[in-house]
Image (cartoon, grey):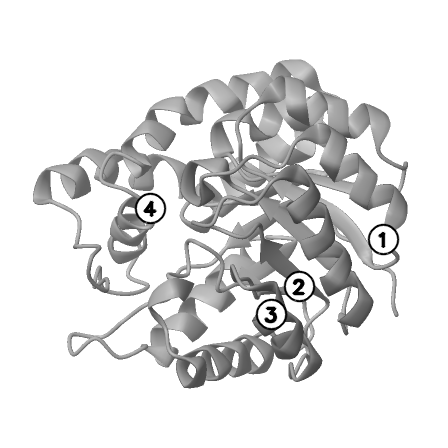
């Protein structure tokens, strides 16, 4: 299995829909090209921001195919494949078509709220069958369970193909503990835009970002500054984006980033229920930042 070499700024890419609710593959192609042309380092297909939980199996396969075709081997691609039934997920991993992808992002089991031992055994089961390197995804605000630094480091030491974590818990102390205690080549990505630059300054490897999907060049400048330990510049850019981050999540994710994408002319703001399109007020509030940072 190949070694995963990604750093700095990845984007959790939205899934655009047309007025009838079908996946808009033409718009998805525009988004992929926009992000790559703007210097983004890698792309994540069908994570939380991609509304993966509302897509059918067939739709997911079609989205993955669009990523592979439009990317054309320009940047590394990560596919989101998660679930809360370990047995079913193991079976899915064994039949995955991973051509064109470099890694799998797999969220901690949600709703059933496993113990730390359950999380450990879940990921070790995936490690035994995975066709690609795995990035674990800890997002306690959505799953109802936090994978602790201790469990993350335990898996990092014991697994053969689990190479990193996206931690979206916004807990700087936990992130710092993972960075300090995990093997040196274990990748630690922030999954929280507000703490991405601070965590990278502490030694993290970068971010899998929502905000970079709408402001790729400017936010990547901040991430690159953090990676090069230019603390003053990194913190300056981080402060600039704080009000934007607050707006992006005001009506939920990916509602805000779809508003930004529509303002950029990339796609419409259609979402699948139970998510609804952004309000006019939110779109108006975001418009000055779109003009300023793009």
Q: Do the residues labelled 2 and 1 touch (CB within 8 Å)?
A: no
* Neighbour tally class for label 3: few under 14, some 14-19, many 20 plus, Cα within 10 Å: some
Can residue 108 be seen at all in this image of the molecule? yes
Q: Is residue 74 left or right of residue 60?
A: right
The spot of residue 48 in percent (x, y) is: 44, 54
Q: Which of marks 4 and 3 is nearer the N terminus?
A: 3
- Tag 3 residue: 89
Residue depth check, mark 4 versus mark 3: number of the one nearer the observer: 3
Image height check: is 58 above or below 228? Answer: below
- Of the 4 image quadrants, the one containing the C terminus is top left
Check the image and name the residue furthest to the left. 280
Residue beneath the point at 52% across and 62% down: 83
Query: Label 2: few (<14), some or many (≥20) within 10 Å?
Result: many
**22 versus 122 height, above or below:** below
Q: What's the mark number on residue 253?
A: 4
| Residue at image mark 1 | 159
- In this view, the residue in front, 219 or 121, is 121
Spatial CA distance of label 4 from label 3 is: 25 Å
| Mark 1, other Cα within 10 Å: few <14 / some 14–19 / many ≥20 | some
**Quarter of the image holding residue 147?**
top right
Q: From this viewpoint, is residue 203 visible? A: no
- Against 238, is 278 above or below? below
Residue at left offset 30%, top offset 40%: 291
Mark pair 1, 4: CA separation:
32 Å
Q: Which element type, helix, strand or loop, lies under badge 2?
A: strand
Q: Where is residue 70 in the image (x, y as percent from the top left)?
A: 54, 78
């Amino acid at each position: 299995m190949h070694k995963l070499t990604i750093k700095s700024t990845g984007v959790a890419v939205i899934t655009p829909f047309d007025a009838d609710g079908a996946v808009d593959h033409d718009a998805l192609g525009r988004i992929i090209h926009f992000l790559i042309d703007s210097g983004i380092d890698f792309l994540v297909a069908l994570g939380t921001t991609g509304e993966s939980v509302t897509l059918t199996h067939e739709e997911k396969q079609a989205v993955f195919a669009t990523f592979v075709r439009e990317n054309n081997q320009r940047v590394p691609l990560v596919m989101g494949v998660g679930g809360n039934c370990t047995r079913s997920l193991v079976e899915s991993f064994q039949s995955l078509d991973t051509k064109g992808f470099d890694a799998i992002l797999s969220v901690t089991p949600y709703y059933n709220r496993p113990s730390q031992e359950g999380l450990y055994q879940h990921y070790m089961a995936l490690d035994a069958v995975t066709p690609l390197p795995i990035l674990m995804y800890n997002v306690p605000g959505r799953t109802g369970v936090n994978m602790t630094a201790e469990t993350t480091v335990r898996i990092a030491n014991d697994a053969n193909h689990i190479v990193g974590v996206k931690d979206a818990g916004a807990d700087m102390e936990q992130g710092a503990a993972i960075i300090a205690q995990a093997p040196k080549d274990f990748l630690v990505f922030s999954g929280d835009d507000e703490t991405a630059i601070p965590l990278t300054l502490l030694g993290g490897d970068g971010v899998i970002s929502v905000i970079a999907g709408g402001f790729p060049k400017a936010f990547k400048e901040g991430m690159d500054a953090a990676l090069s330990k230019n603390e003053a510049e990194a913190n300056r850019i981080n402060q600039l984006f704080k009000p934007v981050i607050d707006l992006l999540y005001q009506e939920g994710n990916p509602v805000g980033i779809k508003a930004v994408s529509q303002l950029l002319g990339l796609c419409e703001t259609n979402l699948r229920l139970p998510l609804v399109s952004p309000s006019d007020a939110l779109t108006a509030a975001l418009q000055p930042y779109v003009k300023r940072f793009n």
